[in-house]
Amino acid sequence: MNRFVLILFYFICISLGAQTKKPSQSISAAQKDSIKSASTKVSSEKKKANIKDYIVISHNQDTTHVDTSLTITKDYKFNYLRKDNFNLMQFSNIGQTYNTLSYNFYDNTIRPSFGAEAKHFNYYQIEDVDYYRVPTPLTELQFKTAFEQGQLLDAFFTVNTSPNFNFSIAYKGLRSLGKYQHILSSTGNLRFTTNYITKSKRYKFKAHIVTQDLLNEENGGLTQEGIENFESGNEEFLDRSVFDPNFENAESKLVGKRFYIDQEYNVIKKHDSTKGKFSLRNITVFEDKSYRYDQSIADEEYFGNSFNTVIKDKKTLENFNTSLEALFKLDKVGDISAGVNYNNYNYGYDQLVQINGITIPNRIKGYNLSLIGGLNTDFDKIKFKNEFKLNVIGEFSGYYLNSELSVPIKESLLGINLNLHSTPPNFNTLLFQSDYINYNWNNQEVFENVQTRLVSVNFNFKNYFKLSADYTNIENFTYFTNLDLSTSYSNVKPKQFGNSVDYFRLKFSNQFSFGKFTSDNSLLYQNVLEGNGVLNTPDFITRNTVYFSDHLFKKALFLQIGITFNYFSDYHMNAYNPLLGEFFVQNDQKLGGFPRLDFFINAKVRQTRIFLKAEHFNSAFTGYNYYSAPNYPFRDFSIRFGLVWNFFM
């Protein structure tokens, strides 16, 4: 890991030292950029590389270009995850987990996932890794201050050594001590990507290697006495380090390594076929993952009785996946794909456990063979996309069917999506072992597949507003809860809901300007029609931003100044269990219903975006009742600074 980091910073230093020329830009409302490439003579003229020549390629082959503009969306994404966290509630320290306020049950997996979902927010999945094609070397640095003794840095470098071959290397590292006792976060995500296409364009591949480790000190939240002192607002307790948490001797760590390659070969030469295209595609993935929970002295008052004085829980998953598809592109029909997928998995622990004469096994091992396929076609400007997966051989049954219809209406766009999905619950709900006695179970013969049916409609009306609605029906909904649905941690177990869960969401977003002022608004209404008490969500979530923006100093600087208001209604917020790395349902304490106000000043100079924010500046005068989860207070007022800096050679 250290060698990879040294190599990364070596490339960064090269990119910094090599910039002998300033990139040229043309800016229109901070949206468009053009970058002058290194001088080369072609017919006695200098070439220029436009910003649109710096291509970003997604996992699904969609392409965009590098964007160095400064918009309010960039402000929303300037965080630890680098994603808009509208439906997430942060914990007090950066690098901790997030409580989910609204759920999207769209899924395309047909096999159990690893579990420890609360630890995966910053875990780079396959679809999170992008690939690049650039005319000149590109470097990007993101820096942001953390909470006490630490910082966040995400450094990225990519280059095309030839027009056909690109590689990139990136490392995101965080260390943050936090305001409360024993909640240090220390994480690292190393990514290496490459993609290549032959000159004939008949063969192409993309690949990545990702290694990541996410470590958190765990303290179990505040004690009951601590909660009372926190809510009192007493000046004696405004220094959050004086609080004694439930324990100060535990830590959790998620570690993952993944090797991925996606390659495609066009069997028919372009000049050999006038009516279509036939190619073969292979995707191979190997991933090794583990989750540990270590505690120097067992806290039986918190988690219940234990086998050992020292807690050392560890679960692992080795997962190998490969697929072979035939791809057909036919005129007047569209893109057709059909193939097979093989998956081999090995999940579990290193020993057997016996409780009251019952043996808890230590492994779930096996394989699955699946059929996969799809059809994408266009009718005039109407796009119709379909894909399916079906397990046909192996231990687990499952299927996935997804249909998407996209209809342009003048300058607007209507999208309709149908998703049918059946998959086994996560591995950690089927089998779990721990040094804590109550945290041992085997549900392999008990739990059934989770059946999900989702319908969604999205309407984008020009640039005026966006409206989306979705309805989800779930059978055998699987969740964690204490048996009495309380916030107690001593007997948290997975359960399946015997009835259906019906869940509805409606979201409205719009943005409008008056002069140099802009208002950006998002409002979400949601309702659990059936299944209240097993799926808990706030009825309303809103985010409203009003900001001023203008160019200054002969357009050398673009400035944004504004205030963001965040709010969600109170509800039975899920509790966090550090031993499982999961949130669980509780129904005896409502939290939420507090405003969060952020004041920000953002600026752009050339390709540098600067962010200064006063977070939750209203904390001292709207009441100390703000929580991220039961026993876990949200962060207080803080001032944080950061920047994103692009270098173009």
Image (cartoon, helix red, strand yellow):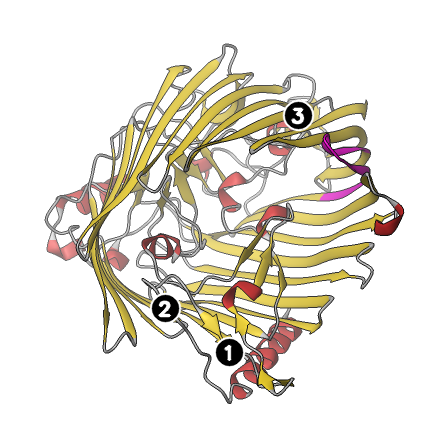
Distance between mark 3 and mark 2 Cα atoms: 45 Å
Q: Main secondary structure of the magenta part?
A: strand
The secondary structure type at the circle numbered 3 is: strand
- Residue 384 vertical placement versus 183 (above, below): above
Q: Which residue lies at the image location 41% right of the left edge and 72% below the top edge?
A: 607
Magenta-drawn stretch contains 335: yes
- Work out whether residue 580 can be spotted: no
Q: Quadrant of the N terminus?
A: bottom right
| Circle nearer the N terminus (1, 3) | 1
Q: Which residue is mark 2?
A: 27
- The residue range painted magenta reads 318-339
The secondary structure type at the circle numbered 2 is: loop
Magenta-drawn stretch contains 302: no
In the drawing, what numbered circle is on residue 400?
A: 3
Q: Nearer the viewer, mark 3 or mark 2?
A: 2
Q: Which residue is mark 1?
A: 36
Identity, as a three-letter code, of the amino acid under mark 3:
Tyr
625 relative position to 121: left or right: left
Identity, as a three-letter code, of the amino acid under mark 1:
Lys
How many numbered markers are drawn?
Answer: 3
Distance between mark 1 and mark 3 Cα atoms: 47 Å
431 relative position to 617: left or right: right
- Residue 175 vertical placement versus 339 (above, below): below
